[in-house]
Amino acid sequence: MSETWDVVVLGAGIVGAACARACSLRGLRTAVVESGAIGGGATAAGMGHIVVMDDSEPQLALTRYSQQLWMALSDRLPPQAEFESCGTLWVAADEEEMQEVRRKQRVYASLGVATEILDSRALREAEPHLRPEMAGALLVSSDAVLYPPCAAAWLLEEAIHFGAKLYAPRTVVSASAGHVRLDGGTELTAEHIVVACGADSVRLIPELPLRKRKGHLVITDRYPGLVRHQLVELGYLKSAHSLTTDSVAFNAQPRRTGQILIGSSRQYGAEHTAVDHAILKAMLARAQLYLPALGACSAIRVWTGFRAATPDKLPLIGPWPADETLFLATGHEGLGITTSLGTGRLVADALSGAATEIPLEPYLPVRGPIEHSSSTHPAAGGLHA
Amino acid sequence: MPDPARSITLTVNGTMVRVQPGTTVAAAILIAGGYTRTSVSGEPRAPLCGMGICFECRASIGGKLHQRSCQILCTQGMDVRTP
Amino acid sequence: MKKAFDVVVAGAGPAGIAAAVTAAAQHRRVALVDDNQRPGGQIWRSGASLPRPARVWLSRLEASAVEHLSGTRIFDHPAPGVLCAEWNETAMELHYEKLVFATGARELFLPFPGWTLPNVMGAGGLDAMVRGGLPVAGKRVVVAGTGPLLLAVAAHLAARGAKIVAICEQAPFARLAKFAAQMSRYPGKLLQGLAYRLAARHSRLYCGCWPISASGSTALESLTLRQGNRTWSVACDYLACGFHLVPNLELAELLGCRIQDGFVAVDDLQQTSVANVYCAGEPTGIGGVEMALVEGQIAGLAASGSAEAARKLIPQRRRMLGFVDALRRTCALNPELRRPAADTTLVCRCEDVPFGTLREHTSWRDAKLHTRCGMGPCQGRICGAAAEFLFGWGPDAVRPPIFPALVSSLAAESTNPNKSMEDA
């Protein structure tokens, strides 16, 4: 038995769900295949920070584009998606980091992103529980947070409303040359197969330049008002971060429930989902350094997840040269929640032959080297696990 | 038998309550005529399990939030708050 | 804070006390760790009106060299031989050569309309509250659920002056009669059961009966009971309702012990599948106090290197296995107990997630992710077991912390010295 589709999306994480929604909206006959829970992979492990990031120009373009799409959608999101426009505070510990605040402000201004520089006193007023000797912060008010699994489920519901069909829980046995074979013998024929399986995409295409980058997150009981904005440290400037070693950074997020989500950590080469105690300890020590009041908060859960990381920290969006029926939408590392909507639109535009609203070239699976801004940003994008 | 000479006095939401030594804070809250917490959708709740695992007995004790009152014994002058 | 012992015993109920006292008698350095302030576990809480074995073992504990770490909650197991615990908001590292865990059991609570009202409690729950100083003299109490605990609780509450309006046992009469007949092999248990029944003799025992709804404005005022096709209402002040016990397996799972048919698998010496780790009491099978005491002694001896002495007790334990089996069969839940939950009935009490919302999901993980069920501070201890009965969903893998712990305690955790990381 074979069913024919314009597009079959593999994976119903937030990226797959966004792709399915955008394709269905565009009138493409779309199917989605998911083997587990909707939004149950990296989507469930992530922080849900909708953030404009400026590691590189293409990253800035995609995060800004996506953040605007989220803003436009925010009124329609269901309450369980917990969308909150709390804004991001990029916290500067000292004068050196304040220079980074100013640099960041200029970059964001060039894209029309309004920001505000807070001095030490203004920061204390904005976040009374931060360590008082912080130098200041950059406030990006248009950033937001949401609860990713429910956001993904809603995007998928919309896709289904516009005619998409969901195959779940079904496992993909193979996907190539316009054919997708599922467990149980179902065969789907498609003009385009969108691979949106995060780090698991290598199961289908082993040659993909993807590595798992493990992250840890901790969530507390309810302490309403303790944290008001998504807080991210700029402290990576002085630390010896690299793309190869384990690292932690301070990242705290207020949930609508009053809970506080604490990150973040990054590890390569860790394949096991178990909590790594050394990393957890370092991550929480870092968090308490910035936000001493966290120490007395009760932590309810700790979890881990795997980001799909690429060498240049940009996602892979576009046809896979070895089999042009395969269209990639993976490798979003720690920014998949933010960039899901932008990715969905790029995919739908490209597959329907329309012009994309931002250039697709920087994200094509085969591409040249990328120029990064002065520093790398391990802190943001949450650890998103 | 209750022994007034050994009794402990604490306050629950500002009201004095007198209990015997060995009384849990959860029991004191119920003796004071209250309940322990308000649920996330606004229901009044009181202890269920009595052994510290259901977290229905959470109350603020001595200014600390989310304390499991069924596992804590009353002490002289303790300040207990419930929503 | 770091403390090292030859034997760490987790859980100060009968099994844990027996293990600790026995190991200390073998001249081992022993710690007995429990969340509660007082030893005895759920069954032997509070010094008043305790049965003789309780008094005997508690005084043995008192007289022993066991270091009793009360008010101490174990939340993690970062490496073999180490447990992390929290005491008085301070993180504590407990190092052990041998570990005996006797983490006991908790009641199974089944949702029905009104079960979240104040004064609807567990059977053991109300019992513990009364032992903790809640007066029930003159109060009207319905005791419901299943298992021998109901009679014990009714007897204790009656002795404290409560008026036991009804005892509702979900098991049919024939099954109880069969159970009672089997108890002739265990005269102690039979006598105890009769004594309990006698103590609460003025209350009526209904078999094949359970509450289907509770109502009241701000607290429980009345209950609707069902027995067969008959339903009726009773006015009452408290409901003490528990559907037997489920073992506390969080620590077992964190340690990586093999679980078989819902209980920790142990050999004749109470040794689990993990080296140097023993288990005693309810986590190996719901068997009651006598069984727990024997298992505790075996584990205490085995963990002290006295395997020969431990083996002498094995026949005693074997004789009781029949009781475990009989109890399990008697307390098997009637599938009809799934019916009282209405769409609006809350299943998850931490996050207020109703039955109707959960019904749309396909697994515990799926439900957790999309409804917040089990995401509150109880970590699914209450709703997880209920969802397992209602929907047949299996539990998730256990992750640390196995009990909510302060962020500062997690940050203070022991880490593997062989592993270093570059801190940011």
Image: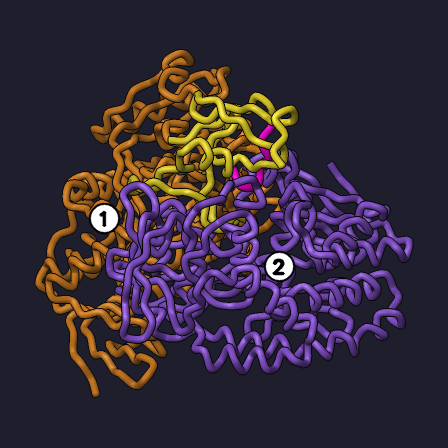
Q: For the N terminus of chain C, give its image quadrant.
A: top right
Q: Nearer the viewer, mark 2 or mark 1?
A: 2
Q: Can the viewer see residue A13?
A: no
The percent coordinates of residue C124 (x first, y second) are: 53, 55
Q: The chain shown in orange is which?
A: A
Front residue (pair C344, C261) = C344
Residue A234 within the segment the image draws in magenta:
no
Q: Secondary structure at mark 2?
A: loop
Return the residue found at the far bottom.
A1
At label 2, the amino acid type is Gly
Q: The chain shown in purple is which?
A: C
Quadrant housing residue C251: bottom right
Q: Which mark is residue A342?
A: 1
Q: Disc 2 to disc 1, how far (Cα)?
A: 52 Å
The percent coordinates of residue B60 (x first, y second) are: 47, 30
Q: The chain shown in yellow is which?
A: B
Q: Residue at x 59, y 74 (%)?
A: C260
Residue B74 within the segment the image draws in magenta:
yes
Label 1, residues with CA under 10 Å away: few <14, some 14-19, many ≥20: many
